[in-house]
Amino acid sequence: MKHRLHSLDALPDGKTIGDILPAFSGVKGEIHLVKPNEDCASCRKPFGMVRRRRKFIRLYNPNLPAPVAFDYWVCGSCLAMHQRGGKESDAFLAAVELYHNGIDQSL
């Protein structure tokens, strides 16, 4: 059995979140309630002139009755780590999950 460092699952190819979670099936638009994170959700380094936001990872909670998603921005270095796949991608997703859960990864 393969052991993962995280509990996040990617959407299957060709599927939308509405196909997976019924609460999202009728969603047509988005409302953003908070400002974007000021540091990378993976490496936790602050964004600035050198380290810019490159892409966000969106997390959905399947246990909520309402369609709520969480967007977390990541830097280019962490995005590249995720795109390489394998253990690096697992480490990236584990770090984002810790960020989502409010856990300091330096512990």
Image: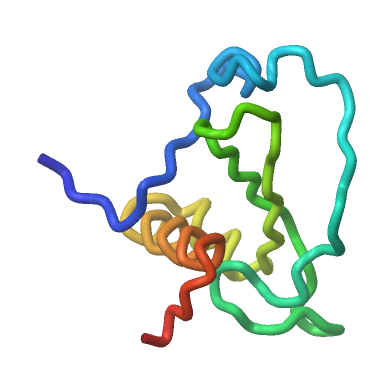
Q: Name the one closer to the observer, 18 or 84.
A: 18
Percent across and percent down for residue 105 are 43, 79
Q: Is residue 45 left or right of 5 when viewed as pictured?
A: right
- Asked if residue 82 is positioned above or below residue 52 in the image, the reply reads above
Q: Is residue 19 left or right of 38 when viewed as pictured?
A: left
Looking at the image, which residue is at 26% across and 51% down?
A: 4
Q: How many marks?
A: 0
Looking at the image, which residue is at 72% across and 54% down?
A: 55
Percent across and percent down for residue 89 are 42, 55
Looking at the image, which residue is at 86% across and 63% down?
A: 35
Residue 44: name its quadrant.
Answer: bottom right
- Asked if residue 80 is positioned above or below residue 70 in the image, the reply reads below
Percent across and percent down for residue 15 are 58, 16
Describe the colour scheme in one phrase.
rainbow
Percent across and percent down for residue 99 are 54, 67
Q: Name the one closer to the observer, 97 or 56.
A: 97
Q: Quadrant of the N terminus?
A: top left
Residue 18: name its quadrant.
Answer: top right
Q: Quadrant of the C terminus?
A: bottom left
Residue that extends furthest to the left in the rendered view of this protein: 1
Looking at the image, which residue is at 86% across and 20% down?
A: 28
